[in-house]
Amino acid sequence: MPNTKRPYLLAALLTAAAVCGGDAVARVFPFGPRHRAVNDLANQFVPFHAHLWDLLRGRADGGPLLDWQAGWGTSFLPDYGTYLSSPFAPLVALLPRGDIEYAVYAITVLKTAAAAAAMTYLLCRLGPGTRWWASVLGASYALCGWSLAEGAYNPMWLDGLIAFPLLCLVGEWVREGRRPLLGPLVVAVCWVANFYTAYMATLGAALVLLVRLAVTNSAGAPAGAPAGDSTGGTVPGAVRSAAPATARTPVRTTAREALRVMLRAGLTTGIGIALAAPVLVPVLLGSRHAHPGLDREFDPAPATDVLARLLPVTYSFATPAAFVCTAVLLLVGTLLFRRDVPGRERWLWAGLCVVVVASMQWGPTHLLWHAFATPNGSPYRQTFVLSGVLVLAARAGLAHGPPDRRALLGGTAVVLALVAGSLPSPFLTPWALLLTGAGLAAVAGALLLPERGRHGVLAALLVTGTLLGQAAATTAYADRERLARLDDYPPWGAEQERRAAALAAADGWPAYRTDPGLPRVAGNDPLLLGGQGAAYYSSHTPAVLTETLTALGGGWTSRGRNLLSLDNPVTDALFGVGARWRDGRLVRAEPLPLVTVRPPGPAPAYGPSPFRNQELLLGSRVYGAPAADGSCPVGTEVFLWAPDVTGTARLGTYETRLLGGRPKRRAALVSLGILRAPGTRPFVPAPGGEVACLDHDRLRTALAALRARAATSVGITSGGLTATLPPGTTGTAVVAAPRIAGWRCENTRAGAYGGLLAIDLAPGTTTLTCTFRTPGLRAGLTAGAGGLLLLALRTALAARNSRRTRPPAPLSP
């Protein structure tokens, strides 16, 4: 391998070793018995990657626009753009589906290593320095606390960790007037991979570009550096030892030149975002159609906690995970005291670090970092940008050589002051103090050693050991704390394999749905286990889906975005569920076809009772009220609706667990079993529930009437459906799928019937054809085509200008 690639490879290897080593110390999957199935990693990322595996292997029910498996049929492109559009995601198809958790873990480590390599490349590109220091700083960025504590179980965010150094690199190209074609393409890839963190990375890269414009001369060389060190040419093959500063006075970038560069940067970014619009616009509209999340006010973390999170082996969900290797903190501290670094460069880089920290703590700039919406969950999702800025500031000093003893003493005092300020924080651990002290001593000693020979090797070992030890310990500590503090779910194992196999064997789609049922494994069991059910959890959970499921007695968590499977004979029949997993076995039923016909008349208007709402959608009365003593007739099935109750409900010897309590959770309507003995009353652990008695004979009669008017055949495609209706059918055709935005039907307007897709039938209609087109896809494609045109014009103009300014070739003698 050429020497030019060694720094990037070293950074990637150090990063992978620290992450895997920390997981091994914590004995966490795949290195021990403790699992990683927590929060959104189990609920969203693993199931969505399993669905991507199915799509890539041709085994999914649905296609790139429409997902027929989750939520009774939902739009898939917004989920793809939010969770799966990373260039790394398709790698899951290289492993067996049963190893999906291994695949997601491997992608997580690979992304983190790629971020280290990208930052190392940027550091090498920015100017001179010692080769191994670039690798250590690049790995320090990738192993920041945000990456280890939050990115580890939100792997889609790790694309933003990669995006920040790449977008800073684009800024360098813009500053030098180079790469007019590649720059927008890099921006587009970053925004497609994960638009949310790419937005934050773009803001951070813009701030870095402003500092770079202020500290470099018009030719692109760092202020104070010799002319031969200009970074305006090709990327240096290796990071050289720093050359001493010269006495010449650099020519500063003029305001007009800086403005020209910023306009060029804006154009580059705009073209890149336009190229990403076919994914971005559907994601934006998907968010607008989604069930609203929690509106919360930003509460800044105490300063002592912010300082504590700069140190290794700390953990907290609501404070910025700002840990970077102590080597980075020490180098940033020494920058303030280095007389050999031009004052403007010292204070601008240090000032940028302070500005980023302050912006994370102030409400208006907090909203700016998060696209003007305080996020549900961790409120410091932009912290990786701070880590990147700290690493760039550390490099700024090293570009002028190692610090002298005076600067080193001052930097040590700065780190000690930060530690002292963090002492009151409850998040500070003894291991944090021990590792910080040991790391400070090791790095300070390394900086005092000569750079050459055995001393240079010893220095590299001291700094690298500090990085690996602190990062691995922080990883292990975060692994343990996540399992103790966050919701966790059963990992993939033999029981899930058996359940998935049973669901696959019973699958009869589209003749009927097979619901993966209860107990649930994760928030997206239909995607993970197979089948087609109501369960669905996404940032894009449609509001109409949540409202419909809630009206029919469904349960949810995450304030209505994590929908649970609804186990009920009426809704199972209405939504075509012919097989369902229940209590460790597969249960079958006789459902309705996916398309039924209701008589002419108004659509049902739901009220507060889920039992009455089910009857409105069914068109028949099938529930009875309990007697005065609270008991149901013998032979009827007793159902309890207690959405805000938490506890155990009983009927005779049968027990079921309720988990309710709005606004965060809502317990689903549950069956307490068939009543066998007269006078038996259900026990509810708290008041406020409603009991109803389901008469199965009435239900069979109602279903027979609907079946007689239902479609005789239904065909499902990856992006729509077709149905054949009996001759002479009139009324309203109702599809057992939510009426989400994007449905279009031939020769008529797609409407809604009780929250479901419905079509008013014209006389003589015997065939129904409906297709789904993701809202915003056409606008996104138009914007993408416009961006492509602008990119072509800009590239052509750049090529023409290059030919005009190219010096003539020398004449042959």
Image (cartoon, rainbow, N blue to C red):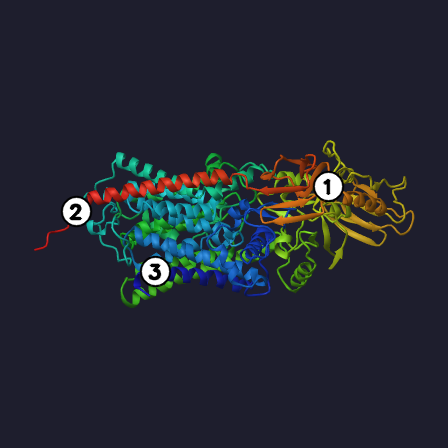
For label 1, count other residues whose C-alpha is less than 10 Å away and answer few (under 14), some (14-19) or many (20+): few
Disc 3 is placed on an element classified as helix
Q: Which residue is mark 2?
A: 807
Q: Amino acid at mark 3?
A: Pro
In this view, the mark in front (3 or 1): 1
Left or right for 711, reference 35 = right
Q: x and y percent of residue 738 in the render? A: 65, 41
**View extreme (bottom): residue:** 454
Query: Which sits earlier in the primary sequence, circle 3 or circle 2?
Result: 3
Disc 1 is placed on an element classified as loop
Left or right for 712, reference 309 = right
Disc 2 is placed on an element classified as loop
Q: Which residue is mark 1?
A: 727
Left or right for 448, reference 811 = right
Please say if 164 is above or below 750: below
Q: Amino acid at mark 2?
A: Pro
Q: Locate the C terminus by quadrant.
A: bottom left
Q: Quadrant of residue 687?
A: top right
Q: Residue at x 42, y 56 (%)?
A: 114
Please say if 751 is above or below 18: above
Rounded to the nearest whole Å, what is the CA distance between mark 3 and mark 2? 35 Å
Q: Nearer the viewer, residue 423 or 813?
A: 813
In this view, the mark in front (3 or 2): 2
Q: Which residue is mark 3?
A: 7
